[in-house]
Each structure stands twice: as C-alpha cells, then as structure tokens.
Image: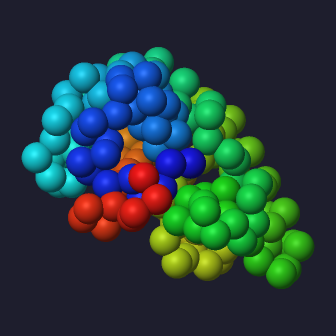
Amino acid sequence: MHQGIGLDAFNAMPKQRAVHALYECCYSVPLAGSLADGRAYDDHDHLYRRADDLLFALGDTSVDAILQAYPQLGRRPGSARSQFEQCAVCDRDPGLMATLQTNASTYRDHFGFDFVMFVGAMSADEVLTHMADRMHNDHETERKVVRNELARINRTRLERMLGPEGGYNNW
C-alpha cells in the first residue's frame, strides 16, 4: 500500500498511479477513478469528504463488489496494517474465534453480504457484541451501517496513504 506520499505528491501523480493508490484504499475502480479525476485537492479533508460523497452515491451492486474484496473477519489476526478492520480481530481463545466465524456466517446468510466493521481498538468480544446488535437491523438499515463502516475504513486508509501534511521525504 502507498504510505505517506503527501497531498502534493498525490495531486501531482499520473492518473493511473493515483487510481492504483486510491484503489488500495477503497477497493473500487470507479470510486478510485472519480477521486483521481477530482484532483487537485486543497487539503486532506477535501479528499476525505469527496471519498465519502462518492461512496454514498454508489449503488448496492458496487458496494457489494467492494465487500467481496475485503478480507473476512479474523483473516489477518493481529495485523498491524489492518489493525482497524474486522480482518485483524483476534483472541487467544479459539472458542471465541470460532463463535465469531459462526456468527459472521450467520450474518452473511441473513444479509447476503459479509460483515465489515471499523474495529479500532475493540476486543473480539466487543466485535461479537456489535455483530449481534447489527443482526437486529433490517436490510436497508444494515446497508447504511455498512456504508458508514466502509467510509471509516477508507478514511484510515486514505490517512495512511497521505501521511502527515507534506508527506514523508521518501516520495
């Protein structure tokens, strides 16, 4: 993943390279292309807001395609790069991890798409509780929740891609 490139370097990238960097953040070629076409961004927040606007404008089929690209719950246990995403959730208790997997499968069967969540520093128990709570949502409500979770994950990935104001000197 592109990391710490800085906004100026991102704005100056050739379109193809910018689309590639953005795709690593959002897993959507149309979204990445539209974000790349929207350059030059004045500041980080402008890019973040535009990414949210474009994500929320996507149809369900496009969001489903994004969800298919996301690693499933617990797929990368303890991963530093994915630490805020559902794939990094881990616990030393294999029974808890098995319960998470079972509930994720139930979620998929119920809603028709995989569970996605910005987990931050939540424990596996906390993720399990949120998943159980979300099972009470109707399909339309859960679609909205998923978009919000994707927006939060995209934001952390975009922040990592850009790095601090000015980026790092390696770009």
The colour mode here is rainbow
- Left or right: 73, with 30 as reference point: right
Q: Residue 103, how many percent across, how many down?
A: 71, 54
* Image quadrant in which you'd find residue 124: bottom right
Q: Tell me residue 64's x, y (percent).
A: 52, 27
Total tally of numbered discs in the picture: 0
Identified at 40% across, 63% down, the residue is: 169
Q: Is residue 24 above or below residue 48?
A: above
Nearer-the-camera pick, 143 or 165: 165
63 sits to left or right of 58: right
Give coordinates of residue 81: x percent, y percent: 61, 62
Asked if residue 106 is positioned above or below residue 34 in the image, the reply reads below
Regarding residue 58, the answer to whether it shows in the image is no
Whole-percent x and y of residue 110? 62, 37
Q: Is residue 108 left or right of residue 14?
A: right
Seen from the viewer's position, the closer of residues 27 and 21 is: 21
Work out whether residue 165 can be spotted.
yes
User: Residue at horizontal 76%, vertical 54%?
Assistant: 75
- Which of 21/108 is in front? 21
Q: Is residue 23 above or below residue 77?
A: above
- Residue sitting farthest toward the right: 94
**Residue at screen point 11% across, 46% down:** 42
- In the rendered image, the residue lying farthest to the left is 42
| Closest to the observer, 153 or 140 | 153
